[in-house]
Image (cartoon, grey):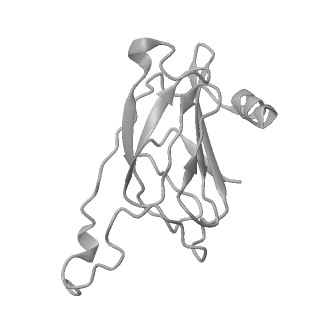
Amino acid sequence: MKKLFSVLAVIATVLLASAFISCSNPSNPSNSGGNSGGGGNSGNSSVVNENDPFAGSTWVAEKDMGGGATVKYTVKFPKSETVDYSMTTAGITSSIYSGSYTVKKNFNGVEGQYGARFHVYTFTIQNKNATTAKFFEDPSITYTKQ
């Protein structure tokens, strides 16, 4: 697994120097009106439906920050239970399926090693049915389905 991420780090191109990613929680105006009384799936569920196209897949994104720092995002969707998330090397890892999730920013695999650079961010998925998607509103990051 470490070899995979090492190879990915070499392939990454130098992009923006900012590690901050802007996120939003759109109100989804396209769903306004109509079935106002439903809402069966309107919560922030973290349970993966086995029929969902994301179930059992892994998504990886990376961004070379320059100066030898690579930000990596690894998102794993298990067949059931809650979404798993884990961090490898320097970067930010997130758990995304629906709703908002808290993610930890972590450097060289040690959370908080650099003190002030240890932060917590919240991200929101935009389109859970896409086969490729910009889960974070940052056009400089490319997401690939593994």
Q: Residue at x 60, y 66 (%)?
A: 80
Q: Is residue 86 above or below residue 119?
A: below
User: 73 left or right of 98?
Assistant: right
Q: Position of residue 138 (x, y in %)?
A: 44, 41
Q: Quadrant of residue 6?
A: top right
User: 66 left or right of 25?
Assistant: right
Q: Is residue 131 above or below residue 18?
A: below
Residue at far front of view:
81
Q: Quadrant of residue 122?
A: top left
Q: Is residue 143 above or below residue 34?
A: above
The quadrant of the picture occupied by the N terminus is top right
User: 61 left or right of 40?
Assistant: right
The quadrant of the picture occupied by the C terminus is bottom right
Please give the count of numbered marks on the rendered protein.
Answer: 0
Q: Position of residue 26 (x, y in %)?
A: 28, 57
Q: Position of residue 73 (x, y in %)?
A: 57, 40
Q: Position of residue 145 (x, y in %)?
A: 66, 55
